[in-house]
């Protein structure tokens, strides 16, 4: 929840129409092409409402009848992360991207929409996010429990500790951090999303038990040392997760584990 | 005869929100093979949007709380037409389900002595909602998703089920298509659990995500299962009314729990003007007492803003109809006023309600620490759904189970806030457990090829036609009609008109003509959704006509009082052999003396 995102300005002299230029692709592996649509300007229009407008009557600006553009959406309040795409060159959720802001920032009256480039492009603006779930599996992002232990009254925890864990737990696997990361391509690096989850689960009272396993998962070729410290991830994270802190703290743990971990075996 | 890719599982779960994930985890832990089908992507289901918290009588904040109080609150909230056994199981098991979630890695806010913090919520006598900030749903989904991914559950994302398959009376699988490529798939299973969520998208103004199209309700109905309580729909009193692009998006009850008050355009705190008799002695009689309650004073009673959702929603409608609404047709919800009471109010509000602060700043350009919000009712939740057995969540069709919002019974005529997240956990687990038990006694059933071909023919016929109808327009018209004619305030005449309207829309649906191919074709998806939306709309309308009284989520201006006779019955809906919708009045079984006594004691 970047404060920069929160500051809103309104267009004083809005255009009559807005051009929405969409990078499209019929299916995985097919040629990508661009179509531009023109819709009437309305106050408080966001990118998803613009797309819905287009979908009802998919005719391009040049008058060509075409198929309705495809995108994913769900919550419409920036908490599920499914509608993430690259808007005017910046990765973000389209439900919270207001047309006014975009036009103000870019000048003119055209908005460009592209699918995220670091994931397989399934069709138009949709991508396959399976790599992110594979990352979670790889780093053991769960607490090992077989259901036989007595839950009792539950552990006591201090609110301050919970605050830090909450910061990491807000991850909605949207993919923004991976898209913005200059090091991440072709799934060669596990990335900030999974590293932050390592931090989260290593802070959990019983999650700690698998701490070493998580750290070791980060010591492989696609591991934490791939981070180039560009800090793009923290700029684009819509949930303001302290990703660079997670990387820093976890890297420290990984280093110590690499040096002295064998002593504990 | 066409060949389709076929997948076999012991248990198939349809829907990957809280209930579906919890059921899949339970079934998988029992060692059987589990398939989990979701229309969207894993972790993006509507549960993610839940804000307030999970209701569980853990008594961490007020030690007077226990399952009996929670049970009695749930029954009172549901106006006593609930399935009392479900309400009992839910109240008893919710605390363990919350602690289990914590053990799996969920983060909850803490009390000063380090236990899970619980907050006040409408209709709950004591602070009972375990929460983290105002993003409890996201926390729950993330935890369940992380806990589920490694268990060997086979997840099928972006797959929509369009028909259940039966071998004789028993459900033995499902027929589905992949949204991505439009390919059809067969799922064979010994037991199927429906966990598809709600129906909000049958209405124009709703807090529901795009997936809330009543799929599970319609699938079960088409497979011959009974629906129950379909007339009861919860309109959440506080949705955003402005700007139009976000109309319907929820403003959590937590705002009122933290001291937010409702005012009309004349500045009057109108909720004090209408407090129902059965809540009089639990409700504050002065703003001052109400404020003390929100700040944790155990001797104070709750402010009238925290009365049940149905009541608050109607009070808001009345103010707006009487011309005392805001410029955009809502009323004011003011949390900024608490600066009169505490010195660091803006920081306090941002800390307690971070995403509400953000949501309004971001989407409406409004600072809730300084200005009041404009809010109005939004379609939020359906209490009705698939009729299930309380212990096992089995529907009336063998092999078919249901859990979460698409199942019914626990909430009666009105659901209390926080009871849905606990419902998901308690009954998701039970559905998983008993589906496994059922599956273990079965062999894989036969798949009937002609059923598949029939489902497929119906799904594709719009591509063969040269009609003139566009599915988006039909959906739009249905939503507008349900909002106007079967909304918060209902009457016989309007609902009869709605029935005619639904017939017409069903006819128009038969004239939909689709172009293009079937891979990722949103027009086609909407055309398929329409069958579900029209089915649930008809069920809602017929049940609402039949219940000639006002109770909970059903308010009728032509029968504006509660009628004791209707308090003894539920309405069930079933597809009769000829294909018509059949409605039946069924008596509510007598409550055991022990539970009756609890209700009498708690008042």
Image (tube, rainbow, N blue to C red):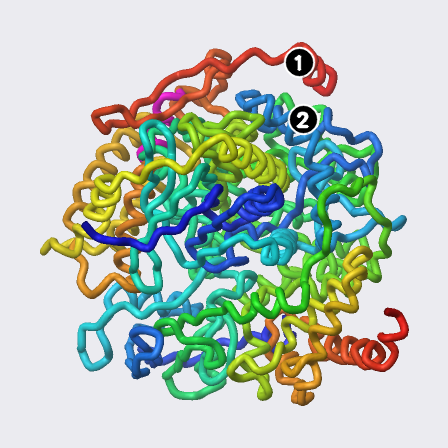
Q: Position of residue A199 (x, y in %)?
A: 75, 69
Check the image and name the residue furthest to the left.
B466
Q: What residue is at 61 percent from the left and 74 percent from the top? A: A237
User: In the figure, residue A153 lies in which quadrant?
Assistant: top right
- Residue B207 among those drawn in magenta: no
Whole-number angstrom distance, CA of label 2 to CA of label 1: 11 Å
Q: Which residues are magenta?
A: B538-547
Q: Residues within 10 Å of mark 2 (few under 14, many from 20)?
A: many
The subunit letter for the residue under badge 1 reads: B
- Given residues B497 and B505, the one toward you in this image is B505
The subunit letter for the residue under badge 2 reads: B
Q: How many marks?
A: 2
Q: Main secondary structure of the magenta part?
A: helix
B87 versus B135 height, above or below: above
Q: Position of residue A242 (x, y in %)?
A: 71, 74
User: In the figure, residue A262 lies in which quadrant?
Assistant: bottom right
- Given residues B26 and B589, the one toward you in this image is B26
Q: What residue is at 69 percent from the left and 36 percent from the top? A: B94
For residue A22, the mark is: none
Q: What residue is at 58 percent from the left and 62 percent from the top? A: B359
Q: Which residue is mark 1?
A: B596
Q: Which residue is mark 2?
A: B71
Q: Position of residue B229 (x, y in %)?
A: 44, 27
- Residue B543 among those drawn in magenta: yes
On screen, residue B436 versus residue B101, left or right, reads left
On screen, residue B434 versus residue A85, left or right, reads right
On screen, residue A172 versus residue A203, left or right, reads left
């Amino acid at each position: 929840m970047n404060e920069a995102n929160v500051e809103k300005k309104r267009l004083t002299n809005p255009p009559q129409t807005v051009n929405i230029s969409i990078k499209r692709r019929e299916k995985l592996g097919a040629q990508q092409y661009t179509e531009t649509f023109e819709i009437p300007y309305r106050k408080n229009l966001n990118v998803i409402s613009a797309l819905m407008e287009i979908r009802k009557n998919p005719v391009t600006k040049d008058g060509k009848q075409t198929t309705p553009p495809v995108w994913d959406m769900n919550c419409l309040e920036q908490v599920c992360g499914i509608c993430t795409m690259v808007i005017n060159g910046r990765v973000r959720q389209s439900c919270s991207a207001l047309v006014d802001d975009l036009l103000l920032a870019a000048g003119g009256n055209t908005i460009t929409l592209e699918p995220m480039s670091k994931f397989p492009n399934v069709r138009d603006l949709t991508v396959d996010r399976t790599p992110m779930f594979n990352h979670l599996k790889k780093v053991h992002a769960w607490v090992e429990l077989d259901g036989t232990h007595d839950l009792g009254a539950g552990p006591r925890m201090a609110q301050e500790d919970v605050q830090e864990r909450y910061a990491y737990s807000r991850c909605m696997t949207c993919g923004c951090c991976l898209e913005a990361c200059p090091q991440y391509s072709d799934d060669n690096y596990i990335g900030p999303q999974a590293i932050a989850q390592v931090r989260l689960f290593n802070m959990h009272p019983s999650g700690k038990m698998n701490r070493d396993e998580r750290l070791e998962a980060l010591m492989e070729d696609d591991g934490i040392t791939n981070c180039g410290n560009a800090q793009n991830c923290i700029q684009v994270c819509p949930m303001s997760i302290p990703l660079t802190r997670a990387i820093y703290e976890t890297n420290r743990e990984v280093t110590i584990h690499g040096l002295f971990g064998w002593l504990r075996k | 005869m066409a060949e389709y890719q076929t997948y076999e599982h012991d248990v198939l779960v349809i829907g990957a929100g809280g209930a579906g994930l919890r059921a899949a985890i339970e079934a998988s832990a029992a060692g059987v093979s589990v398939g989990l089908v979701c229309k969207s992507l894993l972790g993006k289901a509507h549960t993610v949007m839940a804000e307030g918290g999970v209701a569980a009588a853990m008594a961490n904040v007020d030690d007077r709380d226990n399952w009996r109080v929670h049970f009695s609150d749930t029954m009172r909230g549901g106006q006593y037409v609930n399935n009392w056994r479900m309400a009992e199981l839910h109240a008893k098991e919710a605390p363990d389900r919350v602690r289990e979630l914590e053990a799996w890695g969920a983060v909850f806010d803490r009390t000063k002595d380090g236990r899970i913090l619980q907050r006040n919520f409408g209709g709950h006598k004591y602070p009972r909602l375990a929460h983290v900030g105002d993003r409890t749903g996201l926390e729950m989904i993330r935890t369940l998703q992380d806990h589920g991914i490694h268990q060997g559950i086979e997840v099928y994302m972006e797959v929509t089920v369009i028909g259940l398959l039966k071998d004789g009376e028993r459900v033995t699988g499902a027929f589905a298509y992949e949204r991505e490529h439009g390919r059809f798939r067969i799922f064979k299973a010994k037991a199927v659990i429906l966990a598809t969520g709600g129906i909000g998208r049958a209405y124009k103004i709703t807090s529901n995500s795009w997936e809330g199209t009543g799929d599970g309700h319609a699938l079960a109905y088409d497979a011959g299962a009974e629906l129950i309580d379909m007339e009861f729909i919860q309109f959440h009193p506080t949705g955003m009314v402005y700007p139009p692009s976000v109309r319907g998006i929820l403003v959590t009850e937590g705002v009122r729990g933290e001291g937010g008050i409702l005012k009309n355009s004349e500045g009057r705190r109108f909720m004090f003007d209408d407090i129902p008799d059965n809540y009089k002695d639990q409700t504050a009689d002065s703003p001052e007492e109400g404020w003390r309650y929100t700040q944790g004073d155990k001797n104070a009673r709750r402010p009238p803003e925290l009365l049940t959702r149905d009541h608050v929603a109607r009070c808001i409608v009345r103010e707006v109809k009487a011309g005392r609404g805001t410029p955009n047709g809502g009323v004011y919800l003011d949390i900024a006023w608490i600066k009169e009471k505490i010195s660091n109010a803006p920081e306090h509000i941002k800390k307690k309600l971070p995403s509400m602060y953000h949501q309004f700043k971001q989407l409406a350009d409004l600072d809730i620490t300084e200005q009041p919000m404009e809010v109005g009712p939004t379609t939020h939740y359906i209490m009705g759904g698939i009729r299930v057995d309380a212990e096992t969540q089995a529907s009336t069709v063998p092999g078919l189970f249901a859990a979460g919002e698409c199942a019914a019974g626990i909430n009666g005529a009105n659901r209390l806030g926080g009871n849905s997240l606990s419902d998901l956990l308690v009954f998701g687990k039970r559905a998983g457990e008993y589906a496994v038990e059922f599956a273990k006694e079965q062999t894989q059933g036969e798949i009937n090829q002609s059923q598949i071909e029939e489902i497929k023919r119906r799904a594709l016929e719009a591509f063969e036609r040269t009609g003139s109808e566009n599915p988006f327009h039909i959906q739009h018209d249905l939503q507008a009609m349900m909002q106007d004619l079967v909304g918060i305030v209902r009457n016989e005449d309007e609902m009869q008109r709605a029935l005619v309207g639904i017939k017409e829309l069903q006819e128009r649906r038969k004239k939909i003509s689709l172009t293009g191919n079937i891979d990722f074709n949103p027009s086609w998806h909407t055309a398929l959704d329409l069958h579900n939306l029209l089915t649930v709309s008809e069920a809602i309308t017929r049940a609402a006509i039949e219940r000639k009284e006002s109770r909970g989520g059903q308010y009728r201006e032509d029968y504006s009082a509660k009628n004791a006779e209707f308090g003894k019955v539920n309405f069930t809906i079933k597809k009769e052999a000829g294909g018509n919708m059949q409605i039946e009045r069924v008596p509510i079984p007598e409550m055991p003396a022990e539970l009756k006594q609890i209700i009498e004691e708690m008042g």
